[in-house]
Image (cartoon, rainbow, N blue to C red):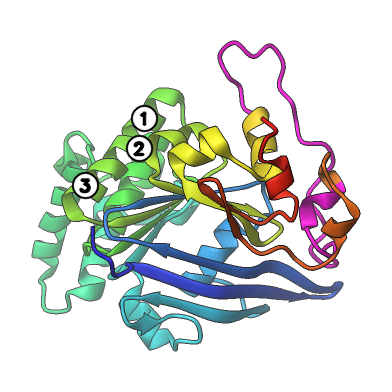
Amino acid sequence: MSTESALSIRDLRVTFKTLLGNVQAVRGVSLDVQPGEVLGVVGESGSGKSVSFLAVMGLLGRNAVIEGSAKVGDTELVGANQRTLRKVRGNNVAMIFQDPLSALNPVHRVGAQVAEMVLAHHHGMSKDDAAKRAVELLDIVGIPQPEQRARQYAHEFSGGMRQRVMIAMAIANDPKVLIADEPTTALDVTVQAQILEVIDRIRKEMGTAVVLITHDLGVVARMADRVQVMYAGRVVERADVHSLFHQSDHPYTRGLLASQPTLGRERLSPIPGAPPNMLQPPSGCAFRVRCAHAAPECAGDVPELIQVRRTETACVRAQELEALV
């Protein structure tokens, strides 16, 4: 595996200016993704997972203030102009969105939309060649009868097939980084497995770095090489997938794992309370207001990631809690 990161993010911060005040959605996220690696990003809704990568792609609204650094290769994306972003989006970094039906244009044929992605970065290619390439891409992602399907509209596809179309559009230009934002949401288990298999095959065959944003820890366990857990706009734990599932040290991560259905477990253990209001996030560790192990020192400085056993954990009591299972 290459030592040069396909995607490198440093101290990313995103603040939304609203009528009620400034929403601190992302508060200093850093990460690296290597070519051919799958990085799982997990956390509750509102933890800043999707916003972080929409910021990287330059897809947030005008009320978003983005600070920090995000590089794909040598190209800096934070603060880049639209011309630079247009060159990078779909070419070096691509995104699979949560809802393929709303992401696809309902009045254009599916094949034409895939071909448009090809033409956007291959200006010398003819429309006929782009249409042929679109059919090839639909075939690559496992859509049956791709020539016939290319002439159909999005509403004529099932949810799983629409998601395959989104993947075809995302890989149209062999991107270095593929960001998959909840790619299996609202799909049944069989179709989920098929979509994940397609993403995994693309990663292996093309050496694409994959960022997998999801609530589903089962998907992470199956797909990811490393995992970052986010809470209240910050990374609270980071580790390889095996260590995170078997030796997690942050109370929030343990809470997520305990709230998942597991064979032999009679009752789930939900995390009490609700995520904080990011207009006024709590001082110190944002999770302390919901944490059964909170102590006065948790309200002090915002904890940084420290190495505990085999994970990096942002918890001032991590060493004390290490023995708790």
Q: Is residue 285 left or right of residue 62?
A: right
- Circle 1: residue type: Ala
Query: Given contact means CB atoms under 8 Å apart, are the residues at marks 3 and 1 in contact?
Result: no
Q: Is residue 168 above or below residue 24?
A: above
The residue lying at 59 percent from left, 63 percent from top is 51
State the extent of the magenta-drawn residues as a range: 260-289
Q: Is residue 264 left or right of residue 5?
A: right
Q: Nearer the viewer, mark 2 or mark 3?
A: 3
User: Against 170, is 143 above or below?
Assistant: above
Which residue lies at the image location 35% right of the left edge and 37% below the top edge? 196
Question: Contact, CB < 8 Å: mark 2 with mark 1?
Answer: yes
Badge 2 crowding class, 10 Å Cα cut-off, few under 14, some 14 to 19, many 20 or more, is some
Q: Nearer the viewer, residue 235 or 198?
A: 235
Does 32 sit above or below residue 185?
A: below
Mark 2 vs mark 3: which is more N-terminal?
2
Whole-number angstrom distance, CA of label 3 to CA of label 1: 16 Å
Residue indicated by mark 2? 196
Q: Position of residue 154 (x, y in %)?
A: 38, 45
Residue of label 1: 193
Q: Secondary structure at mark 3?
A: helix
Between the residue at mark 2 and the residue at mark 1, the CA separation in whole angstroms equals 5 Å
Q: Amino acid at mark 3?
A: Lys
Magenta stretch prevailing secondary structure: loop
Q: Is residue 273 left or right of residue 9?
A: right
Q: Residue at x 45, y 55 (%)?
A: 103
Q: Is residue 112 visible?
A: yes
Which of the two labelled residues, at mark 3 and mark 1, occupies the earlier sequence position?
A: 1
Residue 246 x %, y %: 53, 33
Which residue in the protein does label 3 denote? 204
The quadrant of the rendering that contains the C terminus is: top right
Q: Amino acid at mark 2?
A: Leu
